[in-house]
Amino acid sequence: MELFIQVAVSGLLLGGVYALLSIGLTLIFGVVRIINFAHGELLMVAMYLTFWLFQAQHIDPYLSILIVAPALFVFGMGVQRFIIQPIFDSPALMKIFVTVGLFIALQNLALMLFKADFRTIQTSYSMATIDIGNINVSVPRLVAFVFALVLLAGLYAMLKYTLTGKALRAVAENRVVAQLMGIRVQRLYLIAFGLGSAMTGIAGALLLPFTYVFPTVGGIYTLLAFVVVVLGGMGNMAGAFLGGIFIGLIESFSGVYISPALKEAVYFVIFILILLVRPQGLFGRGKGTEEVGLK
Amino acid sequence: MKRRIFLLLLLLGLVLLPVFYSAPYFLHIIILIFFYIALTEAWNIMALCGKVSLGHSAFFGLGAYTSAILCIKAGVIPWIGIFPALFVTFLGAAALAIPLLRLRGPMFTLATIAFSEVLRRIAMVWREMTAGAEGLTIPFTPGWENLVFTTKVPYYYIFLVLAGGSVYIMHRIYHSATGHHLRAIASDEEAAQALGINTNRVQLVGLFWSSGITGLLGVFFTQYSYMIEPEWAFSQTLFALQPALNGIIGGLGTIWGPVIGAILMTPLGEFLRSYLGALQQGLNFFIYGLVLIGVVMVLPGGIVSPILSFLRHRDFKARQASSGKEAV
């Protein structure tokens, strides 16, 4: 029973970061309507940036968020402006291919710059735990979870109450009508891509103290983000949050009760099953995701 | 007619090539080109219906592992191992058939990635069968019956046959009713269904050929490389991304696109890997990624598209000229 609670707690905490990562993806998808196969690579870029800032400049990973988040915001806007926007009216397949190209290029750029080694950072608190009864709560995981919650609340408030947030929701709802209402749609695409990338970047900085980064790490997180988003229903923020927690729990439990080597295999199987059985997601309403990104 | 003579001459040249020049490294590159022509052609058969797979490494790995394990553990020669290998590949294809028929666009692509990742993990963990990351080695007993040779020349002919065969299969499918139906599905699945096309059946036919050729290539390519391990046999980069890259850069859903893509990209990759790779690991795929972005932005139909439109334009002109004469 103790083990069960222990595993549940660590899964829940991990799920918070997964939620942050996935909400980045669902924000980009919801507004720009593009399926970004390079999403995990955005996370990878942020993780390496955090790693470099720590190793070379001795900046604490949590402090480095102040650099990583704006850097990823600009990077995301650059991707939208120079890669996505020029082919915006091409068929959906073509848009997939450019993001696949981006994912291959970024992954191998990382291989060139950092080699194939697994890297992490050793902070004073990497191994620290807080003991509650017999349950150990990992400090970096707890920090990541709290941080993710605060950010998600912030994003929610921003989308709900600010003018830009309302405009973003309007574009997500119906881009043609939004344009007719005088919203500058192209500019909002840039903001959405930047914002989604920044959220993903923060998730990367939060993950690094207790996980590894290596050049092909992005592929796993791309799939993970899609699993979460499909689970929660495409473009559904609250769904992505619950989906993130759910996948965090699944990963923890299957790592302990099945095999650590197969924990990813387990949620990929769940992914395929969800796509087949309930394509609109566990919490999704309306149309299914099986054709998402085509229209 | 002219085209047929040209193809026959080309084939004759390729058959005679090793007689005149058989430097091992040169033949190795040509063998790789043949292998990638076949693999890309197989990938492209499925891409005909607009469904892009980034998980063909699953079929490759299933075929490769089945025959390699039978060969190493039970002494089954690969010529017989082909049949169980194809059987297991088709079981894998059957598992992917449900996502193929139910999903479209990016979600199908993601499902294929997840599918091949799951198989790779299983191959890593199932150590009794695959020896995990240590890998298995094909016993070195040269001879045609074991498909193990001391020189590269026999492999050259084997992969020449495989490349030629898969181009031929693609050619037959492309011009058959199934091929037209697959292309109709690519442009609009609902409309194709409304016109009375059995979309499920033709997509399964496409999957059958595509996975079968890929599984077969797994059997033969493992014999060529002598050894097999999960990271290699289920490698997303080598056997899923690379054919997709070749296909998209050459020309998606065309007969000759994969050939052009493989001929251009394989030597480029080998050159970058052997000359610059020592300096910079990953440079070759970094450049591939940029080439892919560039091709999609500048030539969305692939490199084959301007050639095709040139040929069509010329045929059209020739027909116009001849019909003009008749009118006079």
Image (tube, rainbow, N blue to C red):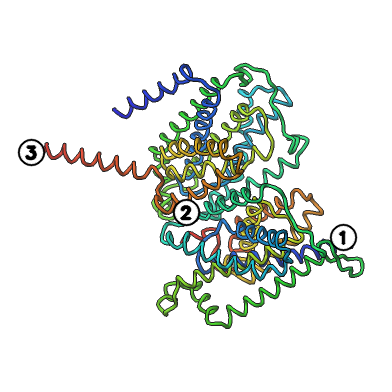
Circles 2 and 1: CB atoms closer than 8 Å:
no
Which part of the image, by quadrant, shows the N terminus of chain B?
top left
Of helix, strand and loop, which one carries label 3?
Answer: loop
Image marks 3 and 2: residues in contact by CB distance under 8 Å: no
Residue extending farthest to the left is B328
| Chain name for mark 2 | A
Residue A283 seen in render: no
Q: CA distance from mark 2 to mark 1?
A: 46 Å
SS at circle 2: helix
- The image quarter containing residue A245 is bottom right
User: Residue B250, position in %: x, y?
Assistant: 43, 42
Residue A206's disc is none
Mark 3 and mark 2, same subunit?
no
* Amino acid type of the residue tagged 1 in the rendering: Leu
Q: Residue furthest right?
A: A133
Quote the CA–CA distance across marks 3 and 2.
Answer: 48 Å
The disc placed on residue B328 is 3
Residue A93 is labelled as: 2
Q: Position of residue B59 (x, y in %)?
A: 60, 39
> Dot 1 corresponds to which residue?
A3
Q: Amino acid at mark 2?
A: Leu
Q: Residues within 10 Å of mark 3 (few under 14, many from 20)?
A: few
Q: Residues within 10 Å of mark 2 (few under 14, many from 20)?
A: some
Front residue of this view, candidates A196 and B186: A196
On the same chain, marks 2 and 1? The answer is yes
Chain under callout 1? A
Q: Residue at x 50, y 38 (%)?
A: B268
Residue A268, placed above or below residue B242: below
**Location of residue B215 in the rendering, given as x and y in whole percent from the top left corner:** 58, 34
Q: At numbered mark 1, what does the secondary structure look like: helix, strand or loop?
A: helix
